[in-house]
Image (cartoon, rainbow, N blue to C red):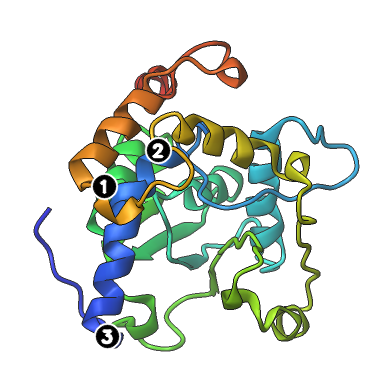
Amino acid sequence: MDQEVKTSSKPEYVQGIIQYYSEAGMDYQPWSRRLNMHFGYFRFGLNPFNRESLLDEMSRQVVTRLQLDHDAENQLVDLGCGVGASARYAVEHYPHLKVLGATIVPWQIEQAQRLTENHAHRDQLSFELMDYCNLPVADDHFDGAYAMESSCYDMGKEFAYHRQISEALDVDGYFAHPYHSWQRGLNENHNGLIRQYLPKGMALNEITRKEIRIIQDKLNNRPRKTLGYKTPNEVYEEMKLAS
């Protein structure tokens, strides 16, 4: 898809976002069969080992807090819509709701439209290539807006202001303890798989994109116990057939 988006952000910043999500988007396949691109929300009564239900619960929490009239004809905008999982969840539960998904990533628009074309509520959904910081609509055009971003804390300097972030958003943040790898089991397991191809201490600046793609393809075609010994690509193909 060869499209340009009008944005108020710096071109190099925009291109970095587009490149990241275009290359990493497929990595969300093992994370969520509905391709949710955020973390989940736990409340009592949910199974903490059923990740998809927690991901859907996050969408439910966000939409519910907009306090929409269930039977009214409202219009929402999903700011940074990913591939539309949260938007699809919203229209499944509000019969008269319409949602516009906005993103600056062409790949996400392609995937959102593909995943929605056979959806029972596809007429209530639309996805547009646009910068949500510079929407070409009046301020009162939508009845509500939401955005979901998930961040995994690390010990790097990028989280030097984590206390201020927690205070501004009124949320708690947690760090894994040093040398407690079991607190990040899935992450450490993937690191171990990658280390089979890129040993610790290897100069990563010498690795080409082609070599990275080869490693990615091998891992995406490797059976995983957590997927019932199917490969991530097999699970993805099943999802496409079911969508």
- Under mark 2, the amino acid is Leu
| Three-letter code, disc 3 | Lys
Residue that mark 3 sits on: 10
Q: Is residue 29 above or below residue 204?
A: above
Crowd tier of the residue under label 3, counting other residues whose Cα lies within 10 Å: few below 14, some 14–19, many 20 or above: few
> Which mark lies nearer to you, 3 or 1?
1
Where 110 sits versus 185, above or below? below
- Residue farthest along the left direction in this orientation: 2
Q: CA distance from mark 3 to mark 2?
A: 33 Å
> Mark 2 falls on what kind of element?
loop
Camera sees residue 146: yes
Q: Secondary structure at mark 1?
A: loop
Query: Is mark 1 in CB contact (under 8 Å) with mark 2?
Result: yes
Q: Which residue is mark 2?
A: 198
Q: Secondary structure at mark 3?
A: loop
Q: Are marks 3 and 1 in contact (CB under 8 Å)?
A: no
Q: What residue is disc 1 on? A: 207
User: For the residue carrying disc 1, how many other residues have a C-alpha within 10 Å: few (<14), some (14-19), or many (20+)?
Assistant: few
Q: Quadrant of residue 46?
A: top right
- In the displayed structure, 160 sits above or below 122; it is below
Residue 51 in picture, x, y percent from top left: 68, 35
**Tally of marks:** 3
Q: Label 3 vs label 1: CA separation?
A: 28 Å
Percent coordinates x, y for residue 40 in the rendering: 68, 48
User: Which of the numbered marks, if any, corresponds to residue 226?
Assistant: none
| Residue under the point 9% across and 58% down | 2
Q: In the image as oriented, which residue stretches furthest toward the right?
A: 44
